[in-house]
Image (spheres, rainbow, N blue to C red):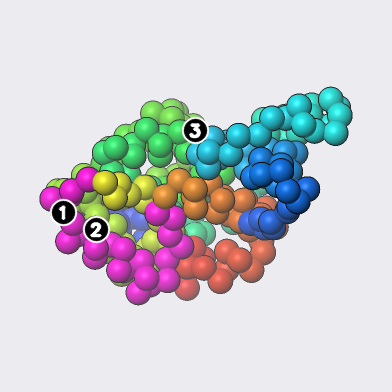
Amino acid sequence: MSFADQVAKSKDLSASARFLAKSGKTGGGFKKALDASYVSKKLGASKKLLNVIVDLSDSDSDSDSDSDESEVEDIDADFDSVFAPEEMRCLALIAHNHMKPSIRAFVEANQNLLKKFRLTGTNTTMKMLKEVFGDDPSVVYGPTCQSGPLGGDAEIAAQMCIENLGGMIFFQDPMDAHPHSADIDCLNRQSLVHNVVTFNNPASAYAGMFTFREALKHGKFILEQCTFMLP
């Protein structure tokens, strides 16, 4: 199916953190300033990403530690979404070459949340999504775009322009040169022009998932104020 047909099909479908800073004891350095139970409970899989080294043995009790560990394991628990994937615009996932392991780890850590959205992305990332989700019939895919250097970023930008895309998780590599830098600049600019929810690195993406989960679970205005919802 051509990209144009995929977009048309996707368009037809669309037609039908809290994260508060909590300080611990003053003095004693950065480690003591972080509350171990709070960090482990709220950041879960992103602790290593943020290079926060927390010793759970510092918790008040073994029972508290066991409870926290249980909550971390359940951080991507399945849930019922107020909105069906077809009722929202697409969520795009993109990653530069050196960031592909990071985005795969991110997807694996947030499978139950991500499958609540209609997923689109560049060629390699879409292949990765289908590997991770396998034959799960509940996953809804939008258009599969070309690889970035072959025009995939431009195709993602086009979906923004026709209001078929409301969010973008784009793990960019700032340490490498890109032959399609003009397309990348265009994509980033269009995300600003069209007020698309955008996460450009793993830290922001992990943090943003808490907001998405709450919005999908409770139908809060957060999601409605973003461009995920139909016009």
Q: Residue at x 17, y 49 (%)?
A: 178
Q: Residue at x 24, y 63 (%)?
A: 185
Between disc 1 and disc 3, whose residue precedes?
3
**Among the 4 quarters of the image, the one containing residue 216:** bottom right
User: What kind of residue is marked 1?
Assistant: His
Span of residues in magenta = 176-200
Q: Residue at x 75, y 39 (%)?
A: 37
Labels 2 and 1 touching (C-beta < 8 A): yes
User: What kind of residue is marked 2?
Assistant: Ile
199 drawn magenta: yes
User: Closer to the observer: label 2 or label 3?
Assistant: 2
The residue under label 2 is 184
Looking at the rendered structure, the secondary structure element under dot 3 is: helix
How many other residues sit within 10 Å of disc 1, few (<14), some (14-19) or many (≥20)?
some
* Relative depth, front residue between 81 and 178: 178
**Among the 4 quarters of the image, the one containing residue 192:** bottom left
* Relative depth, front residue between 118 and 38: 38
100 drawn magenta: no
The residue under label 1 is 180
